Image (spheres, helix red, strand yellow):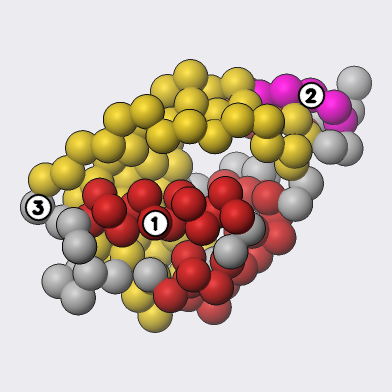
Amino acid sequence: MSNIQRVLTIYEAFGRGDVPTILSHLADDVEWEHGAADVGIPWLKPRQGRAEVPAFFEAMGALEIRSFQPKTLLERDNVVVAIIGLEFVVKATAHTVKEDDEVHIWRFGDDGKVASFCHKVDTHQHWLALQPT
């Protein structure tokens, strides 16, 4: 299985809400939001290790995802870059976030497990969506 196929499998599981399948593709010591700082956005908080990743999906419960569309996936060596079209509403504020080209960077170990993952997004737009009107 190629790493692009692994990422597509993860995205399909995400669409079904199948967190156990996603976790099965992660290394024990996965770096979730690799290289990112905690900027107060619960679903973009850095997490260390597979045991912390379910908190990401719990944080996603604050969102109503209207669309999630992988548009382009590029692979080289053990890295997959995915360009995603995404739209969601923050339930507590009813504010919408639309990312035409959100970027996901997946790094894989030689064992085929995700060693690190990060979103590259408009964090200001996400932060504003959390703010009450």
Secondary structure of the residue carrying tag 1 is helix
Contact, mark 1 vs mark 3 (Cβ under 8 Å): no
Name the N-terminal-most of marks 2 and 1: 1
SS under mark 3? loop
Q: Is residue 120 above or below residue 9?
A: above
Q: Residue furthest left?
A: 77
Left or right side of 58 for 12: left
Q: Is residue 40 left or right of residue 13?
A: right
Residue type indicated by callout 3? Asp
**Residue ID for mark 2:** 95
Where does residue 86 sit, x and y in percent of width and height?
A: 55, 29
Magenta run includes residue 96: yes
| Residue 38 appears in the figure | no
- Binning the other alpha carbons within 10 Å of mark 2 as few (below 14), some (14 to 19) or many (20 upward) gives some
Residue that badge 1 annotates: 9
Sooner in the amino-acid sequence: mark 1 or mark 3: 1
Q: Quadrant of residue 124?
A: top right
What residue is rendered at 11% in x and 45% in y?
A: 76
The mark nearer the N terminus, 3 or 2, is 3
Residue drawn at 30 percent across, 30 percent down = 72
Prevailing SS of the magenta stretch: strand
Measured in 3D between alpha carbons, the distance from the residue under mark 1 to the one under mark 3, in whole angstroms, is: 19 Å
Residue at the (44%, 42%) spot, across then down: 119
Amino acid, disc 2 = His
Which residue is rendered at x = 73% and y = 23% of the image?
96
Q: Which residues are magenta?
A: 93-97
